Amino acid sequence: MFDRVADKHEHYLDLLSARQKLVASNIANAETPGYRTQDIDFQAEFAKLVKGRQADVLEPAGLETRNDGNDVSMEREARLLAENAVRFQLVGMMAKGQFRAIKNALTEGRGA
């Protein structure tokens, strides 16, 4: 029972971690000529990750490219960092709630 709850959250955290690394790389290369922004399609990749496959890295379309060929938008990357932080908090709260429900069910089952 615990494994199913933990596995689901672990997959989600793995994907968040992969995205966090990409965003950090984008920020680190914001001034690198020719650097192209990398990201993942979060929802599509989550579906793959649940099935045990690795996330595919992509170059987001429609980003403005500077004269040096770099297309990193610090505003976009800051938004993605904030979004990832919220998702990390959410999955932590979800896991805590699910484990609390399991604990309550076990505790109530003993007292009956």
Image (spheres, rainbow, N blue to C red):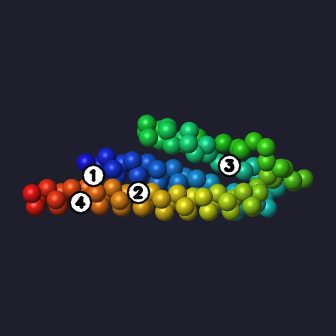
CB-based contact (under 8 Å), mark 1 and mark 4 = no
Of badges 4 and 3, the one in the foreground is: 4
- Circle 4 packing at 10 Å, graded few (<14), some (14-19), many (20+), is few
Q: CA distance from mark 3 to mark 1?
A: 34 Å
Residue 25 visible to the viewer = no
- Circle 3 packing at 10 Å, graded few (<14), some (14-19), many (20+), is some
Residue 27 visible to the viewer = yes
Q: Amino acid at mark 3?
A: Gln
Q: Position of residue 6 (x, y in %)?
A: 34, 52
Q: Amino acid at mark 1?
A: Phe
Marked residue nearer the N-terminal end (1 or 4): 1
Q: CA distance from mark 1 to mark 2?
A: 13 Å
Of badges 3 and 1, the one in the foreground is: 1
CB-based contact (under 8 Å), mark 3 and mark 2 = no
Q: Which mark is residue 104?
A: none
**Residue at which label 4 appears:** 103
Q: Is residue 35 toward the left or the right of residue 86 in the image?
A: right
Q: Amino acid at mark 2?
A: Met
Marked residue nearer the N-terminal end (3 or 1): 1
Q: Which mark is residue 2?
A: 1
62 in relation to 29, above or below:
above
Outermost residue on the right side: it is 67
Q: Is residue 44 toward the left or the right of residue 105 in the image?
A: right
Q: Secondary structure at mark 2?
A: helix
92 in relation to 9, above or below:
below
Q: CA distance from mark 2 to mark 4?
A: 14 Å
Marked residue nearer the N-terminal end (4 or 3): 3
